[in-house]
Amino acid sequence: MLKNQIRKQTLKDRLSLSDSTYHEFNKALLEQFKTLDFNGIKTIHIFLPIKEKKEPDTFLLIEWLNQTLPDIKIVVPKADFETALMTHHEYIGEEDLKKNLYNILEPQKGNLHEGEIDLVIIPLLAFDKQGYRVGYGKGFYDRFLNGLNAQKIGLSLYPAIEKIDDVHEQDIKLDFCITPTEIIKF
């Protein structure tokens, strides 16, 4: 299946989820996330969810990390739509976040992080059994991940699809993907 078809279908499927099913999927994602090995992890980059698109609720992961592993620094992205690049800022709380023109929550005062990142939680609409993902098509994460020596972990409400037919050479493969039922290693 082609990325454009996958995008349309997955968005439709996500938006049709009942609130209770969406909530249950997010609780299950958190339970899977808790089983990751955090040894040696000092900094985690986590995307912030677009709730209107029923993206996985990463605030649950952030809350758990803050309570359980408070020494891990959490950084969140801020997108520059003119350059299609992201900057990374220390997460200092929900009160620091504001929606941009595209309804994406972004940090306002969190310090710019230019150091190492050990693990990246990556947004996606779908992923395949080879470890490739379908995002919204702007390439922000592929540019960010290119050359980055960090664990690359996708977060998906749904299981893997068989194959994305139009993978490009600049598409960055995931190391793992967390679903509500399992963690898949590629």
Image (cartoon, rainbow, N blue to C red):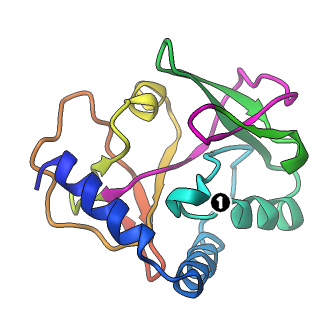
Where is 146 relative to 151, above or below?
above
The part of the image, by quadrant, that contains residue 158 is bottom left
Q: Magenta region: which residues?
A: 101-126
User: Residue sitting at 68 percent across and 28 percent down?
Assistant: 88
| Magenta stretch prevailing secondary structure | loop
Look at 42% across and 24% down and name the residue there.
Answer: 143
Q: Nearer the viewer, residue 123 or 113?
A: 123
Q: For this rendering, which residue is in front, 68 or 17? A: 17
Give the x, y percent position of residue 6: 22, 56
Residue at image location 67% in from the left, 29% down from the top: 116
Q: Secondary structure at mark 1?
A: helix
Quarter of the rendering occupied by the C terminus: bottom left
Q: How far across and how far down the image is residue 178, in percent?
A: 47, 67
Please provide percent x and percent y for residue 62. 75, 58
Amino acid residing under circle 1: Thr
Horizontal side, residue 165 vs residue 68: left or right: left
8 versus 25 height, above or below: above
Q: In this figure, what is the number of numbered marks?
A: 1
Q: Quadrant of residue 42?
A: top right
Viewer-proximal residue, 85 or 73?
Answer: 85
Residue that badge 1 annotates: 58
> Is residue 107 magenta-colored?
yes
Please state, as top left, top right, bottom left or bottom right, where the N terminus lies in the image.
Answer: bottom left
- Is 133 left, or right, of 97 in this rendering? left
